[in-house]
Amino acid sequence: MSKVKKAVIPVAGFGTRFLPFTKAVPKPMLPILNVPAVEVIANEAASAGIEEILFIVGQKKEIIENHFSPFTELEEKLEAERKFDFLEMIRRQQTFAKVTFAVQKNQRGTADAVLAAKSFVGNEPFAVLFGDDVMYNEKVPVIGQLISAYDATGKTIVGCKQVPLKDVPKYASCEYSSADGRMYKMTKITEKPPIELVKSNLAPLGRYVLAPTMISILENLKPSANGEYQLTDALDIEAAENGAYAYDFEGTRYDMGDRLGFLKANVEAALRDEKLKNDFRAYLETLLDE
């Protein structure tokens, strides 16, 4: 049985690329069809065996909290009207895992957000799923793949994909000394390197399983040049001091922090939906023929 039973989901960002929508609504509530992205991510964690989820929240936190809380009046109305499909939809958020919330008081970077979970994770390994990144794998949840890799190694695992070399400066770069299938023994990780310094196109994309040793590193981390505390910098130290692996996961990643990524997630979800796909495909073909 896996030792990884806790997950941290940071969702405290301002979502400036989706203004004016995010002035009033947290970006993680952006929908994929009729399901908020934050619910899709929580479901990924629960499907991988996670039993406790901590959301790191910021402004407008009540909206996310309400989504994962009971709504007795609505539930009673749906039950009385025998709308059981809708009833199941709003009750399932309460069955994923035990859900709690912590506030990131200041926006000081990804490492600071994860460190806000210190008391929650204790001395246990834990998963981290960033709220901008929605993953799709019909068979094996992406975070579940990383948990299996952690169980096999006992080392921090960074979820990665091979990306075009020109795109590496938008993400980060994982350098490695050896590879075994999808597993890469990581030697260095660099946040948004200049294109001329890129040595690997293996880029981390929002999924991690962190060993307990990461908490001490996060506590003693120094800020980067822009004054923020970056998880990438902590992972670089972890790789050097304790060992870490990059794992090239199987699945599709959608960047919900980007308008094009949001559209891709919705179009592809619609084309997978049994009730929508035929009519939606016909509609798209009509548009393309014009």
Image (cartoon, rainbow, N blue to C red):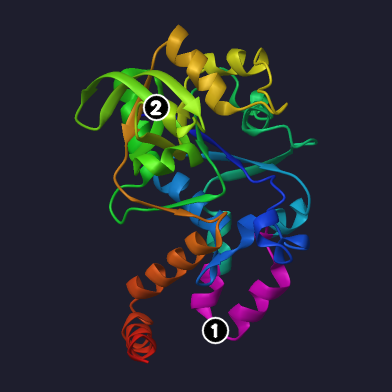
Up the image or down, 96 lies above or below 171; here it is below
> Residue 248 vs residue 34: left or right?
left
Answer with the quarter of the image where residue 17 lies: bottom right
- Identify the residue under disc 1: 82
Q: CA distance from mark 2 to mark 1?
A: 52 Å
Residue drawn 35% across the image and 28% down it = 246
Which residue position holds label 2?
A: 174
Q: Main secondary structure of the magenta part?
A: helix
Task: Please tell me whether mark 2 sits on a helix, a strand or a loop.
Answer: strand
Outermost residue on the front side: it is 196
Q: Residue 184: which quarter of the image?
A: top left
Q: Residues within 10 Å of mark 1 (few under 14, many from 20)?
A: few
Q: Nearer the viewer, residue 252 or 212?
A: 252
Does 81 lie within the magenta span?
Answer: yes
| SS assignment at label 1 | loop
On the question of residue 115 being in view, the answer is: yes
Task: Identify the image quadrant of the N terminus.
Answer: top left
Q: Which residues are magenta?
A: 67-89
Count of numbered circles in the view = 2
Which residue: 45% across, 23% down? Answer: 189
**Circle 2/circle 1 CB separation < 8 Å:** no
Q: Amino acid at mark 1?
A: Arg
Mark 2 or mark 1, earlier in chain = 1
Name the residue at 77% across, 55% down. 62
Q: Is residue 87 highlighted in magenta?
A: yes
x%, y% of residue 59?
Answer: 78, 49
Answer yes or no: is residue 68 visible: no
Q: Position of residue 267 (x, y in %)?
A: 42, 72
Give x and y (percent) for residue 230: 61, 27
User: Residue 22 vs residue 90: left or right?
Assistant: right
Given residues 135 and 62, the one toward you in this image is 135
Circle 2 residues within 10 Å: few <14, some 14–19, many ≥20: many
